[in-house]
Image: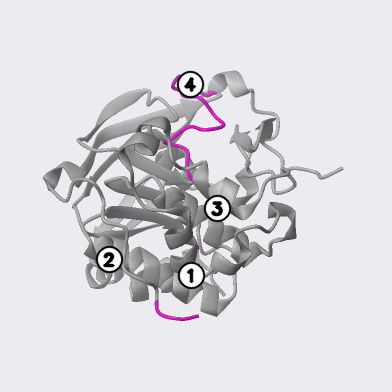
Amino acid sequence: MTRRPPGLRRQGLFATRTEQTNENHSENDYHFASVPDFCNPWFAASASEPSPPVTPHALTTDNRLQASDICFSYGGRQVINHVDLDLSPGTLTALVGPNGAGKSTLLHLLQGRLVASGGHVVCGCSVALMPQRAAIDWTFPITVSDMVNLGRNGARRRTGGPSCHDLLERVGMAEMASRRLSQLSGGQQQRVLLARALMQNSGVLLLDEPCSAIDPPTREHLLGVMRQQAESGQTLLVSSHDWGSALDSYDRVVVLDRSVLASGSPADVRSKLSDLTCMMGSHCCE
């Protein structure tokens, strides 16, 4: 029997996160939006040069995502404290912070999976979320292509969009389309999750630690795909606790520890918080 990480409850293929940092926390403390789990179009779910990017439906200012004074608490503890964000179309932004800083919770609030206790989010387009690898039951008996096609909701089945084959080529997994999920390595799993997220062709893409515990070539490939998506006009927010990668690979950086400690260009953030390298001592993309 496969043991799932603490703080996750199983619903079909996807495990719903309750709270990894507090195993005694009651799931009733989370206020979920009424969104289906298994084929939820919001809950999507990447060494050669990536192929051309998937072009989002709307390359306009509608791809802007703004959050104002967002708050969230459970068990009497405030975990997101008056957060403001303004993500412009065509930008690749890193959301960095130590473990337990609230990064995953904030992504779920922005995506609509969780309901904020205060503040509001404004976005004029669809928002996709690539979950952490631990949120998926990789023993579920489906193939790689099945997994990617789960990212296509009913409306997009009728109106077209990127093909599963094209997306698997982009992430370097086309030759493994018929392979079972249980046969994939960690890096291959991340590639498949990114392909599934791109299948949604959303204006905004939120990625929860896509570079966690993968080899450097896979990390560079995933970052290349994400960079191309930003250049096509998509808005991307990528959570990580790898401070060094955030400074080297992203357009903008948001430093979170329950509240926003700093935000701006990597150079601006470095000058504001020069001691964060010590605080963010662990690296997720090694």
- In the rendered structure, the answer to whether residue 126 lies left or right of residue 192 reads left
SS for callout 2: helix
**Nearest to N terminus: mark 3 or mark 1:** 3
**Nearest to N terminus: mark 4 or mark 3:** 4
Q: Which residue is mark 4?
A: 31
In the image, what residue type sits under mark 4? His
Q: Quadrant of the N terminus?
A: top right
In the image, what residue type sits under mark 3? Asn
SS for callout 1: helix
In terms of depth relative to the viewer, which is nearer, 7 or 154?
Answer: 154
Q: Which residue is mark 1?
A: 278
SS for callout 3: loop
Residue 61 screen position, x and y as percent:
12, 46
Q: CA distance from mark 3 to mark 1?
A: 14 Å
Q: Quadrant of the C terminus?
A: bottom right
Q: Which residue is mark 3?
A: 99
Q: Is residue 234 shown above or below 152?
A: below
Residue under the point 47% across and 67% down: 169
Front label number (3 vs 1):
3
In the image, what residue type sits under mark 2? Val
**Nearest to N terminus: mark 4 or mark 2:** 4
Q: Is residue 54 shown above or below 105?
A: below
Residue 123 occupies quadrant:
top left
Q: Which residue is mark 2?
A: 269
Residue 216 is tagged as none
